[in-house]
Image (cartoon, grey):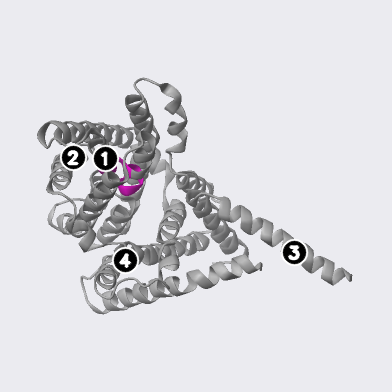
Amino acid sequence: MSDSLRMRDALQVAFARAYGRWRALERGWRATVLSLGVIAAIAVVGP
Amino acid sequence: MSDGALARVGRLAPGLALLVVLAGGATVVAGAVPGVNALLLGVFFGAVVANTVGLSDWARPGVETQKLLLETGIVLLGARIALDELVASGPALVALVVATVVAGVVLVEVVSGRVFDLADETGSLLAAGASVCGVSAATAIAGTIDADGEALAHVVAAVLLFDALTLAAFPIAGDLLPLSGRQFGVWAGLSMFSTGPVTAAGFAHSEIAGQWATVTKLARNSMLGLVALWYAIRYADGDTSGLRSLFEGVPRFLVGFGLVALIANLGILSGDALTAVGTASDALFALAFVGLGLDIRLAAMRKTGVAPLAVLGVQLLAISTLALTAVLLFF
């Protein structure tokens, strides 16, 4: 298996795990995570 | 992206697109017609669609994200809150919140049991719904006291009817009464039942009113844990195992709101970044309020009995009068 395939598989596993955790969160925590994501994006990319 | 996540995005997209189209339409019409508020028009458009053509199954998953959109909008609103101003008004605001929640719960319990002869459980669900945070509070207390589903359904329909009525009435009252934005916001936050309509009515009045309405309502929401604990003890005949409900009852997005307010007030973000966060919050509110309108079902509201409506009417009248007097005296 090439390095790029291994990298892709690892990314897929990481994404599936993160998605599973997101689905398990209560709505209020999801709102908090989304908001912090929006703020981080604005801070990094710029308004 | 995993297949599950892709499929989920595909299910959400049509309903989200419907929210965007209706919110965009409301913004365009409100921009063209003087005196029309885009947020309230969005609620109206949603209610018209829900009660004429109805909400199709393809749109339901996306539209059901409206509560997440509303809570995210509220968390981001934290960036616009001046903590020093909030701390200065804190003691008076907290005292008013505690007084109105306690007075509301006691009043509804007494009126529903002694005047309208409603079952204890129905009275308690009405008390929590009217005094703390609408449908979410009634649902949380139903779980705490193990209330039956039919009682909860009637209470939810009655609360939603009052949400729709107060959403129309409070902005009109705000225009007629000589209240500042801060006074109107605190009054709406203390009197109206559910978080969405409070936020919409506040911002329909003014930016300042919207901020104070949201902060006041969040303070009221944070009382849910204490109210749930009280009901757990009362219905369990003194059993204090309900202590857990003190923590379970506190809405989680309050933590996010406090965190964002802290980040904004520490001066980490530039003025332009804070404005952009505010714009994101406004956009989420616009979508969420259309979803709020799409949740209004006139047919279901008609099935609610007269007694629960009368109890809520008495509570609203008494508490909003008390709150208005207190706001005029202390704010």
Is disc 3 on the same chain as disc 1?
no
Q: Nearer the viewer, mark 2 or mark 4?
A: 4
The label nearer to you, 2 versus 1, is: 1
Name the disc covering residue A11, or none: 3
In the rendered image, the vertical position of residue A33 relative to residue B223, given as above or below: below
Residue at x 25% of width, y 59% of height: B205
Residue assigned mark 4: B294
Picture mark count: 4
Task: Identify the residue shown where x is 14% and y is 46%.
Answer: B313
Determine whether label 2 and label 4 are within 8 Å by CB: no
Q: Secondary structure at mark 1?
A: helix
Q: Position of residue B185 (x, y in %)?
A: 27, 50
Of the residues under marks 4 and 1, which one precedes in the sequence? 1
The chain carrying label 4 is B
Residue B148 visible somewhere in the drawing: yes
Helix, strand or loop at label 4? It is helix
Query: Could you tell me the amino acid type at mark 4?
Result: Leu
* Tag of residue B131: 1
First-in-chain label (2 vs 1): 1
Residue B5: x percent and y percent?
Answer: 60, 66
Marks 2/1: CA–CA distance? 9 Å
Question: Counting other residues with Cα less than 10 Å from the Cα at mark 4, is it few (<14), some (14-19), or many (20 or more)?
Answer: many
Q: Chain of mark 3?
A: A
Q: Are marks 2 and 1 in contact (CB under 8 Å)?
A: yes
Q: Secondary structure at mark 2?
A: helix
Cα separation, mark 2 vs mark 4, equals 28 Å
**In percent of the image, x 52 and y 51: which residue is there?**
A32
Confirm or deny contact between disc 1 and disc 3 (CB under 8 A). Answer: no
Who's the residue at 32% across and 58% down the image? B207
Give the quadrant of residue B80.
bottom left
Magenta range? B126-138
